Every structure is written in structure tokens, then in C-alpha cells.
Image (tube, rainbow, N blue to C red):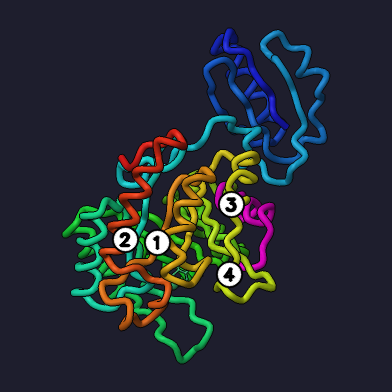
């Protein structure tokens, strides 16, 4: 349920209303806009008397919210959310590119890639330390050493780091990580979502291989219900009958999600296509469709990458792509970085 309160409302009347709602056992999410303030009520609202609330002078409108996601719902928070990652603002009128290798392989590799992507304008560094691989015999990542190397690269370049958490058992290792990535395979690992929601850190939540957008929003809701509102959604391609690309990039997810949620949405053109040559066209298409950013795999030597070399750009290709992305941004009313 949402209550739209007039901005002419006095502070005392406002706090009285909030206290009364809380006494009914509900959580209140406050979103202050230019002309009105929206109160989002979360919990069992069946006992709330809509007519009684509507009759209050300070109330403009009361509306039941049908969707099962509340905190993530744009009706609760009409303005776009802006997520702060080490001073960088993700969402609204900004555009960010997160870049780096699929996995951290060595100190030399991650530092070289970090320096290269920074020089081209990436604002965050990605790199897997714990890798979810289809085969148990494939490279599983450098694990805790991988996190240490990412922190070293962060120290060298100043780039905030984004890396995937696979298990709650490793959460302690992530205390200096700037953005915790929840990968496609864990989108509905609800216990993991609850735990990351308790960290209060920015969370990059990837859409599952076979999940609907509503399910993605419900997973965001799990994180937000724990009090963490810093969620960045990521479309990374879904399973379809098509085999010419690794996955099928669902670009319509951008406008469809934007209609329903205030959370920023970024696109992963690397895992969605699986082919380095297709990363550029799909990146530019993502800009055109209104994405708030991209997460792109870049490797200093893709042919020798331990994971996902075929979809990784080399630093020169990435640099060229960054130039095109920046040139396109004015068309969609966004500015790069910050
Ligand atoms: C990744 O980003 O390296 C990754 C494994 O992505 P996804 O969870 O989207 O497959
Ligand atoms: Mn990868």
C-alpha cells in the first residue's frame, strides 16, 4: 500500500501518521519528492482502513500495491535510485562501465587489466575470485588470494572492485569489497540474498538463466527486506532455444524493469553473447535502450584466459568501445561516470 502525503503537511502530522502505521506492525518506506512524499507500507496491510487514511487532510491519495515486490517497486519510490559505490553514483542520469577479467588469474594480470580499463575510462573493476563453473574440474578461481589481488589492484588504481560471492561461508573475506556480485546461478539462493542484505553494501544482482523479471525483482526484494536498498540489477542473457549466442540478451528487460522499479539496471554483453565480436553492438544497443551501465569482460591476453576468453575484449578493443559509448550518451540524456 502507498500513501501519498501532501508536501504542505506539517512535520508533527507526518510523524504522527508514521507512528500510527508502525503501531499497526507495518514497516514504512519514505520517499520524498518535489511535490509530494510517498509512504510505502510493507507488511500485512489487510487491517489498514483505506477510507480512514484517505479522510486525513494531509493525505492526497491511498493506493493498494498489487505487485508482491514492495521496496523495489517504483510506486514506493517514484524517483530513480542512485547507488553510491566509493563516490561513484550509479543510476538516474549517469552511465558507468565496470570492466575486468572473468577471473583473477595472477597479480600481473589483474593489475595490467585494471590499469588498462582505468585508462579507457572504466569506473569499476570486475574480477572473479570464486568462480561458479559448470564443471567441477574447471578452474574454480584463486579464492581468498583472488580477493587479495583485487584489493591490491584497487590500491594501485583507485577503482572500486566488484566480485562474486558464492557462499555465505566466505562473507568475511568480502568486507573490503565495494560491490558484492550475486551471480545468475544464485539469483534465487534466498539464504545468500538475506545474508548479503544484512551487509548494507551495494549488491550487483544478476538475472538467473531461466528467471522472469518479476522473479528478479522478488530477489531484489529479499535483499531490500533486510534493510539494504543498494541493489543494482543486471541482465546477463537468458536461456532460449537459440544456439548461435551463449545466451539471448533480453534488452526489453531495460524498459520493462524501468517501468516497475527505481533500481538501476546494467547490462552484461559478455555473458549474454559469449562472443567478443558481439560485445560492441550489444553494448551500444544497451545504451540506446536506456541502461544505466555495462559490465564487460576484458583480458590482457584473451587467447590464454583461464575462463571466458572467447567473450573477452582485449584492452584496445575495449578502449575503442568506450569511445563509442561516450559518444552515444548525449543521445539518451546521460553523462559518463562520476
Ligand atoms: C561472471 O560475471 O563472471 C559470471 C559468472 O556471470 P553470470 O553469473 O552472469 O554467469
Ligand atoms: Mn565470465
Q: Earlier in the sequence, mark 2 or mark 3?
A: 3
The residue singled out by tag 4 in the image is 247
Tell me the mark number nearer the camera, choosing from 2 and 3: 2
Q: Nearer the viewer, residue 98 or 171?
A: 98
The segment highlighted magenta reads 209-224
Seen at 61% across and 51% down, the residue is 253
The residue singled out by tag 3 in the image is 220
Q: Nearer the viewer, residue 87 or 170?
A: 87
The residue singled out by tag 1 in the image is 296
User: Rounded to the nearest whole Å, what is the CA distance between mark 4 and mark 2?
Assistant: 21 Å
The residue singled out by tag 2 in the image is 318
Circles 4 and 1 in contact, beta carbons < 8 Å: no
User: Rounded to the nearest whole Å, what is the CA distance between mark 1 and mark 3?
Assistant: 22 Å
Q: Quadrant of the C terminus?
A: top left
Q: Earlier in the sequence, mark 4 or mark 3?
A: 3
**Quick one: SS at disc 1?**
strand
Amino acid at each position: 500500500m502507498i500513501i501519498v502525503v501532501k508536501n504542505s503537511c506539517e512535520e508533527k502530522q507526518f510523524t504522527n501518521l508514521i507512528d500510527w502505521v508502525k503501531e499497526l506492525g507495518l514497516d514504512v518506506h519514505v520517499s520524498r519528492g518535489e511535490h509530494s512524499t510517498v509512504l510505502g507500507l510493507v507488511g500485512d496491510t489487510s487491517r489498514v482502513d483505506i477510507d480512514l487514511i484517505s479522510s486525513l487532510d494531509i493525505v492526497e491519495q491511498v493506493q493498494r500495491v498489487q505487485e508482491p515486490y514492495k521496496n523495489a517497486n517504483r510506486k514506493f519510490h517514484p524517483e530513480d535510485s542512485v547507488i553510491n559505490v566509493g563516490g561513484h553514483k550509479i543510476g538516474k542520469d549517469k552511465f558507468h562501465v565496470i570492466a575486468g577479467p572473468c577471473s583473477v588469474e595472477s597479480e600481473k594480470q589483474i593489475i595490467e587489466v585494471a590499469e588498462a580499463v582505468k585508462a579507457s575510462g572504466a569506473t569499476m573493476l570486475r574480477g572473479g575470485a570464486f568462480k561458479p563453473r559448470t564443471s567441477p574440474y574447471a578452474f574454480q578461481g584463486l579464492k581468498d588470494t583472488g580477493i587479495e589481488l583485487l584489493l591490491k589492484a584497487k590500491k594501485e588504481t583507485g577503482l572500486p572492485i566488484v566480485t562474486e560471492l558464492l557462499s555465505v561461508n566466505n562473507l568475511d573475506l568480502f568486507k573490503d569489497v565495494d560491490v558484492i556480485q550475486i551471480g545468475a546461478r544464485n539469483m534465487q539462493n534466498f539464504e545468500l540474498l538475506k545474508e548479503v542484505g544484512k551487509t548494507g553494501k551495494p549488491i550487483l544482482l544478476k538475472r538467473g538463466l531461466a528467471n522472469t523479471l518479476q522473479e528478479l525483482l522478488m530477489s531484489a526484494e529479499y535483499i531490500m527486506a533486510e534493510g539494504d536498498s543498494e541493489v543494482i540489477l543486471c541482465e546477463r542473457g537468458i536461456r532460449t532455444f537459440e544456439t548461435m549466442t551463449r545466451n539471448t540478451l533480453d534488452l526489453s528487460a531495460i524498459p520493462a524493469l524501468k517501468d516497475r522499479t527505481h533500481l538501476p539496471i546494467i547490462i552484461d554483453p559478455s555473458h549474454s553473447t559469449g562472443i567478443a565480436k558481439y560485445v560492441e553492438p550489444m553494448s551500444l544497443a544497451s545504451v540506446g535502450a536506456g541502461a544505466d551501465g555495462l559490465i564487460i569482460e576484458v583480458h590482457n591476453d584473451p587467447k590464454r584466459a583461464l575462463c571466458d576468453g572467447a567473450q573477452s575484449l582485449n584492452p584496445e578493443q575495449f578502449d575503442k568501445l568506450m569511445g563509442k559509448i561516450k559518444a552515444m550518451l548525449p543521445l539518451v540524456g546521460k553523462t559518463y561516470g562520476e
